[in-house]
Amino acid sequence: MAAASSWSTEDVLFLERLSAPNAVINYTRIAGRLSLHASSSGLVLLAYGPTSLKEAVLSGPLIAYTSATPAAPARLREVLAEVRQQGYAYCPGYVHQEALGIAAPVRGAEGAVVAAPSVIVPNESSAHAVVPVVRSAAGAAALEHELHGRAPDEVLTTNGDMREVAPTLRTHTP
């Protein structure tokens, strides 16, 4: 599964989704939303987002989808610091125990994070192999924007099929 997303209010909005046959469970839907604090894309957008957004999410209700979801403000602060330090979100079991989300930031012209492509893979140790692919996809979207003036979300959702991101993701499954 691959998703391109952006944030709106305190949710992450999924702009596109691809699923392989027999893919791991995934609750996202095109034009669907999840809480910023629970999804890999949301955590990337939140980690690099405005302080006012972080404070709004931290002071609001934090839903625990599973026991792994960072649903306490102190834990969420730790996770956001990890995302900024690593440069990606790695979320084992945050929304479903059998699924693991990985997302990386896409920066716009001004350097602000404007999107976060993600993958949902089985919650297994081999999932770390996907991190470089997700980071490369995010970097490619940012470079396409810089070189050709295409918005990162346009690159990630070209003709609704993520054709510029998905082929890389499909060839690097754990």
Image: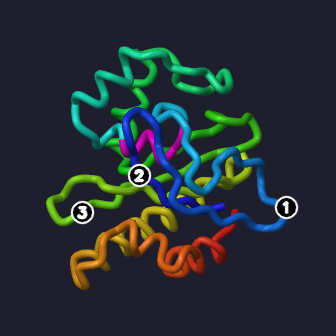
Q: Are marks 2 and 1 in contact (CB under 8 Å)?
A: no
Q: Which of marks 2 and 3 is nearer the N terminus?
A: 2
Residue closest to the far right: 22
Residue closest to the far left: 110
Q: Name the front one of labels 2 and 3.
A: 2
Q: What range is drawn magenta here?
A: 39-45
Q: Indicate whether 63 appears above or below 42.
A: above
Where is mark 3, residue-wise? 108
- Residue at point 48% right, 52% down? 103
| Nearer to me, 5 or 80 | 5
Where is mark 1, residue-wise? 22
Q: Which of marks 2 and 1 is nearer the N terminus?
A: 2
Q: Indicate whether 53 appears above or below 129.
A: above
Q: Which amino acid does label 2 sit on?
A: Ser
Is the residue marked by circle 2 packed among few (<14), some (14-19), or many (20+) residues within 10 Å? many
Give the alpha-carbon distance from disc 2 to disc 3, as whole Å: 12 Å
Q: Could you tell me residue 57's position as x and y percent?
A: 38, 24
- Residue at point 48% right, 48% down? 13
**Secondary structure found at label 3:** loop
Q: Could you tell me residue 16's position as x and y percent?
A: 56, 63
Residue 124 visible (yes or no): no
